[in-house]
Amino acid sequence: MAVAAETSVANLAYPETRKAELVEEQFGVKVADPYRWLEDDVRNSKEVADWVAAQKAVADPYLDNLPGKQALAARMKALYDYERFSIPQKAGGHYFFTKNDGLQNQSPLYVRKGLKGKDRVLIDPNTWSKDGATALDQYEPSPDGKLLAYAIQDGGSDWRTIRVIDVKSEKPVGDEIKWAKFTNIAWVGNEGFLYSRFAEPVKGQEFQALNENQQLMFHRIGTSQSEDRLVYATPDRPKLGHTVQVTHDNRWVVITSAQGTDEKYEISLIPIAKGMGQVLPVEKWKPQTLIPGLDHDWQLIEGMGDELWFVTNKDAPKLKVVKVDLRGKQPVFSDIIAERSEPLARAQIVGSRLVLSYLKDAASVAEMVSLDGKPLQRIQLNAIGTASGFSGKPGDPETYYAFSSFNQPGAIYRFDSTTGKSSIFAQSKLSFDPASISIEQRFYASKDGTKVPMFIVRRKDLDLSKGAPTLLYAYGGFNLAQLPAYDPRKMAWIQSGGVYVLANIRGGSEYGKEWHDAGRLLNKQNVFDDFIAAGEYLIKEGIANKDQLAIEGRSNGGLLVGAVVNQRPDLFAAGHAAVGVMDMLRFDRFTAGRYWVDDYGYPNKEADFKNLLGYSPYHNIKMGVHYPAVIVTTADTDDRVVPGHSFKYTAALQAADTGPKPKIIRIETRAGHGSGKPTAKLIEEYSEIYGFLAKWTGLELENDAAK
C-alpha cells in the first residue's frame, strides 16, 4: 500500500486506502461507498488482510509507546486482582457458580454440595485454549443437579457449541451441539433440553451471513445432534427468532418469538404434561398460540400448574405483572401488579412471593409482594447501585442476588423470601477503600429541555478547581438501561485522577418505553443531542474543559461517538468508538444486523433512509474541519457488528482533511463483540485505549503507579 503524508502533531503516516468508484442512487440521492470492499471478511480477502496489517503497523507502535500505557496497565492489573463471583444457580441440592481468583483469563465454574459444602472446580475454561480466548458462555444444570449443559464461545463469536458434563464424575457425557446462537438452554425434566439454532452457514460465510430461519430443537441426552427433534420453526416467516423456557413443573414449554430487537413478542405454548404426570413424547407436542401479533412486550416470570405469570407493557408503558389462567377454553388474563411511576426491571417468583425490581432514576429498588399483589416488604439495598438476580422457583424461599455500584463489585447475597432477610454468600476484598470514591447523580437539560440524569464518579480528594480529564460514556439504544456497575478499567481512570461520567440518555429503558421511543427511529437525533448536552454541561459546570473531555461508546454507543464527533467536533478532545455501527445504510445486510431495524429503521424505506443518511458516521465526516483524536476499536471475529463498519469508517476518516490529531484503529485478533474476552486481553486493550484518551485530555500518567 502507498503511504500518505505524515500528520504534523501525531507524526503518523496512514496507509492510503484504495477508493473504488462506487456510487448508488436511492430515492433520488446519490451515495458514494468507495470503501465497500472493506466489508469482505479478513479471512477470505487478501486485500482486506493487507489493509488490516497496514493499519496495525501504524497503530500498534503508536499505542505501545504511549507514555501512560504501562502505568495504566499496572493499575488495571491491580484492580482486576480480586476474587469475584457469579450468582449461584441451585439444582438438586447443588449450587453452581463461577469464581475468578483475580487475574484468571476466564472464570472457572464451581459446584458446591449444600449451602455449607466445599467448593470444587467443575469446568475450567482456562485449559481450553492457549490464548485464553475460548470462554464458558452459559450453563444450565438439570433439575436433579446430576448433569450440566454448558455453551462454549470461541474467539468472541456469537456461535455456540453446547456440551454436557456429569456433575459427580466431572466427565463429559459426549453430547455436542453445534451452530447454536442467540439461545437459551431449557431442560425438559432430566432427559434432555431445548435450544435455538440456525442452519450451518456456507463455508466462508460463518461470520457475515444473515441469521434467518431460527429453529427450536430438542436434544435427548446420549444421542447425536442429527437425532434432535424440531420443536418449532416458522419457515414462512424467516425473520422471526425464537427463544424457549420451560416452567419449573414441566407443564409448559413457552416460546417467545420476535422479529427484531424491539420488545414486541408473540408467545406460543406447548403443553408437555398433564397434571404432574409424565412428560409427553416430543412427537406429540403441539404448539398453540397464546399471544399473537408482534405488538407488546411479554416476559415469562414462571408457571404453576395451569397459571402463568408475565411482565408486559400492554396498556402499561412502564410494565406490569399479569397472570394467565389456562384452565378454560380461552385464556383469562388478570392484572396482579399495576403499572407504577418507575419502570419494572424484573420480576421473579421465589417461594410463595413475587420479588420485584424497579428502576428509580437509573438505580435499583426492590420489594416483595404476595402472588396476588399485596405489598409485603421493601428489600434494603443501602446505596446507589444495581441489584440483579433474584431467580428462584415456587416452593423454594431461597434466592440470590448481586448488588454492585461504581465503587464496589457485585457482592452476592442469599435472600430468604419467607423471613425477608439477606445474608452474604460471597463478597470481594478490594485493594482500595470504596469510601474514597465520590458518586454523585445530577440532572441536566438536553436541547429540547428534557431532563437527563448522569452519574459523576471521581476520587473525593480530586481538585476540580481547573477541571479534570473526564471520560463521558453512554449507550442510548435498544431499550437497554445503563446502570451503576463496577469496572476495573474505569476505576483505573478514576484512581489516576480522571472523572468518569455515565449519561443515561434517551433510547434506553431508564424511564420505560417512552424513554426508549424518544431515542429511536426518527427520534434518534435526541440521543445525539442528549450526549452533546452532557458534554456541554460538564464544561459549563467546570468538571472538565473542552481540552479535557473524552467520549466513549460501544456498539450502538460506537455509532453514538461517530455521530456526535461529526456533529460537534469542536466539543471533544478525544473519542473512542468501539465495535460501532458506522454504515447506517447497510447494517441490515450482515449477521444479526437485520434485527436492528426496530431501533434504526429500514434503509430501503425512504423516510428511514433519509434519516439514517443524515447521521450515519461513515457518510457525514466533515472535510476541512479539525476533529478530536479518535481511536476506533474492533475485532476480527465480531459477528455481531461486523468489523467492516469500523474499517470503512476509519478509512474515510483518515482520507478526510480533519486536522492533525490522530485517527487510528486498533484491531484485536481472536476476539469478537466483547463477551468472553480474556482478562489479559482486556488489560492490554484498555491500557492502550485509555492511555490514548489520557494523552489527548491531559491526564498525567507517566510517573503514576498502581495503588
Image (spheres, rainbow, N blue to C red):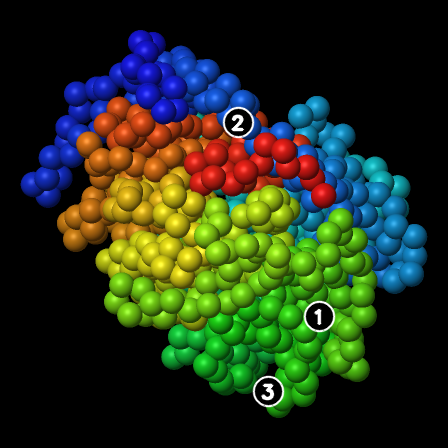
Q: Amino acid at mark 2?
A: Leu
Secondary element under disc 3, as helix, strand or loop, is loop
Q: Residue drawn at (23%, 27%), measured in percent from left and top?
A: 657
In the displayed structure, 2 sits above or below 462; it is above
Separation of residues labelled 3 and 1 (CA atoms): 17 Å
Q: Which residue is mark 2?
A: 66
Instruction: Decide which of tag 3 and tag 1 comes sooner along the chain.
Output: 3
Instruction: Decide which of tag 3 and tag 2 comes sooner along the chain.
Output: 2
**Residue 276 rendering spot, x and y as whole percentages:** 72, 72
Q: Which residue is mark 1?
A: 393
Separation of residues labelled 3 and 2 (CA atoms): 58 Å
Secondary element under disc 1, as helix, strand or loop, is strand
Task: Indicate which disc residue 373 carries.
Answer: 3
Tag 3: Cα neighbours inside 10 Å, few (<14), some, or many (≥20)? some
**Residue 250 rendering spot, x and y as whole percentages:** 68, 65
Furthest-top residue in view?
Answer: 2
Tag 2: Cα neighbours inside 10 Å, few (<14), some, or many (≥20)? some
Seen from the viewer's position, the closer of residues 288 and 298 is 298
